[in-house]
Amino acid sequence: MNGNINGIGNGGFSAAESEYIRRHHRHEPDWRIGMEVELYEEFGGSVWSLVRRFDQPQRYKPFVSRCVAPGNLEIGSLREVDVKSGLPATTSTERLELLDDDEHILSMRIVGGDHRLRNYSSIISLHPESIEGRPGTLVIESFVVDVPDGNTKDETCYFVQALIRCNLKSLADVSERRAVQDRTEPIDRI
């Protein structure tokens, strides 16, 4: 079976979330994560500061062991990613398609490597959101990929969705850990 699939969600989004999806994603994604991250922007860390570093995905993506991205970080930049063992991949060559610091959007496309994700592209967008009355961030990631020979659409979606959920969980954990560390750092006194 060969075909193209989209990471399609199950609905249930708020009006604001639906508007973000309509504006920035090609379809409804199934992944949302809210984090209290905007609270500590003053401490020098934010979710966006992790996500926007196309050249350093290993800062929050647990399956990336190494990344080499020569040159300046700009649209069309390539990165060579080494994947940790345990996944059906060893390397991935990825191109930065979009990096918008004002709208907090990053899009990438896989253009080569030793893996089965052909014609894979993803977009991740970050949006301010109130979480239990506190400032936070809504993170939405969606993807498009071809179904590889020997796999079904459901198997391919399950694999990619699990990988993205793992990355977003790690992003939340790293962001929150950085926030706590930044808030509890001792102040040097004269």
Image (tube, helix red, strand yellow):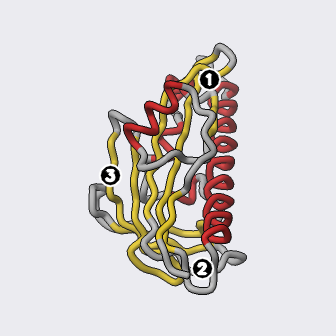
Tell me which numbered mark, 1 or 3, is placed earlier along the sequence. 3
Circles 1 and 3: CB atoms closer than 8 Å? no
Residue at x-position 56% and y-position 85%:
149
Q: Which residue in the protein does label 1 denote?
A: 188
Query: Within 10 Å of the Cα at label 1, are there few (<14), some (14-19), or many (20+) other Cα atoms?
Result: few
Q: Amino acid at mark 1?
A: Asp
Residue at x-position 62% and y-position 64%:
157
Q: Amino acid at mark 3?
A: Leu
Q: Which residue in the protein does label 3 denote?
A: 98
Whole-percent x and y of residue 119? 42, 72
Q: CA–CA distance between discs 1 and 3? A: 41 Å
Query: Within 10 Å of the Cα at label 3, are there few (<14), some (14-19), or many (20+) other Cα atoms?
Result: some
Query: Within 10 Å of the Cα at label 2, are there few (<14), some (14-19), or many (20+) other Cα atoms?
Result: some
| Quarter of the picture holding the N terminus | bottom right
Considering every residue shown, the one lying at the far top of the view is 133
Q: Which residue in the protein does label 2 denote?
A: 89
Viewer-proximal residue among 54 and 155: 155
